[in-house]
Image: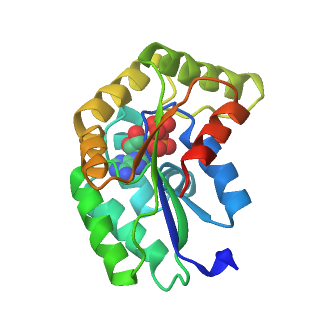
Amino acid sequence: MTQRKNKVVIFLGPPGAGKGTQAERLAREGGLTKISTGDILRDHVARGTELGRRVKPILDAGQLVPDDILIALIRDRLAGMEPVRVIFDGFPRTTAQAEALDMLLEELGAPVSAVPLLEVPDEVLIERIVERGRQAVASGQTPRADDTEEVARKRQQVYREQTQPLIDYYGGRSHLRHVDGVGTMDEVYARIMGTMP
Ligand code: ADP
């Protein structure tokens, strides 16, 4: 029954905060589609598409891909979706992206439902990212090219400069929910659920 209703959740938080893992579970349990822009871009890189070739150096350097590319990707994903039941992981990352998303959602008649912000101290974040890179190597997988300490610090800086302003953007629209992101995956998940409308 509730499955018919629009629901739009935006996960905010620094790189390494656990957005992807938590969004995955919330999507599964809530009947929502997870849209992870990092995954979409990495998939293009892996497939060697034209877009992938264009964005690879940007990803590898920990910089942001231009807004127009991201906005077009999201517009495509949302086109024809009915009802709109999505979790955004890694988007929006700039104020321009947030404004474009608001316009898209307005066209679709699907307003933002909630914006959980996962909060984790900087040093824990770097540890998690470097550990994720190590784990990938240990299990015979190719680690993400940007999961090194140097690039992780760059991604943190980019987050502070370009994405943190979104905390005020969504705070001003009273969608923002602060969530302590330190703890087990289950603990953090329970906290997120506690903030959902
Ligand atoms: P993180 O673990 O850093 O949150 P993501 O998987 O979300 O990683 O993103 C990885 C990279 O993909 C970013 O560093 C950036 O280069 C690119 N990217 C992902 N989403 C966006 C976006 N919304 N705008 C611009 N670049 C993005």
- Give the percent coordinates (x, y) of residue 41: 47, 54
Residue 84 horizontal side relative to residue 110, left or right: right
- Give the percent coordinates (x, y) of residue 149: 46, 17
- Give the percent coordinates (x, y) of residue 122: 42, 18
Of 146 and 98, the residue lying toward us: 98
Q: On screen, 25 above or below 74?
A: above
Q: Which image quadrant is residue 34 in? A: bottom right
Q: Quadrant of the N terminus?
A: bottom right
The residue depicted at 41 percent of the width and 67 percent of the height is 74
Residue 69 visible somewhere in the drawing = yes
Residue 55 visible somewhere in the drawing = no
Q: On screen, 119 above or below 86?
A: above
Q: Which image quadrant is residue 109 in? A: bottom left
Residue 170 horizontal side relative to residue 59, left or right: left
Q: Colour scheme in the image? A: rainbow
Of 3 and 44, the residue lying toward us: 3
Residue 180 horizontal side relative to residue 92, left or right: right
The residue depicted at 61 percent of the width and 65 percent of the height is 33
The residue depicted at 70 percent of the width and 26 percent of the height is 184
Of 195 and 166, the residue lying toward us: 195
Q: Quadrant of ligand 1?
A: top left
- Give the percent coordinates (x, y) of residue 11: 48, 48
